[in-house]
Image (tube, helix red, strand yellow):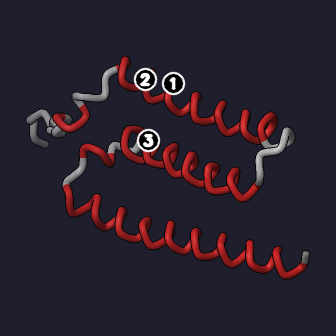
Amino acid sequence: MSSEKHTEHHDHAEHDTMTRGRIVRVFIYLLAITVLEFAIALIAVPHGLSLRIANPVYILLTLLKAFYIVAFFMHLKFEKAGLVYTLVIPIIFIIGLILVLTNESNHWVDLRG
């Protein structure tokens, strides 16, 4: 048996920018977005805000939260561009699909009325 020490070398340089302060700041952003979503759902919509306005706002706020989670907590912001593009391009297509389906669902709701 060898008496050599086995040490693993990990390159943590990309994670050096994730300080405690940045994590707290991202948490506060996520909390603020969530509070805004709840305010829209519990205050604005019952007091007359149309769902045609509220639903796209919900989608945009949810996508913004997803960006912060993926970028900072999953460390995608610190990855190489190739990996980012392999995830961003399908997400753009999914967003387009969501918009098309939302528009189509509004059409079917209008037919019933």
Residue sitting at x 73%, y 33%: 39
Q: Is residue 7 left or right of residue 104?
A: left
Toward which corner of the image does residue 42 lie, by quadrant? top right
Q: Residues within 10 Å of mark 2 (few under 14, many from 20)?
A: few
Q: Residues within 10 Å of mark 1 (few under 14, many from 20)?
A: few
Q: Position of residue 36 (x, y in %)?
A: 64, 34
Q: CA distance from mark 2 to mark 3?
A: 11 Å
* Amino acid at the residue labelled 2: Arg
Q: Position of residue 96 (x, y in %)?
A: 50, 71
Q: Which residue is mark 2?
A: 25
Mark 3, secondary structure of its residue: helix
Seen in the picture, residue 105 relative to 27 is either above or below; the reply is below
Q: Position of residue 24 (x, y in %)?
A: 45, 21
Q: Earlier in the sequence, mark 2 or mark 3?
A: 2
Toward which corner of the image does residue 56 lie, by quadrant? bottom right
Q: Which residue is mark 1?
A: 28
Q: Which residue is mark 3?
A: 68
Mark 2, secondary structure of its residue: helix
Mark 1, secondary structure of its residue: helix
Q: Is residue 97 left or right of residue 8?
A: right
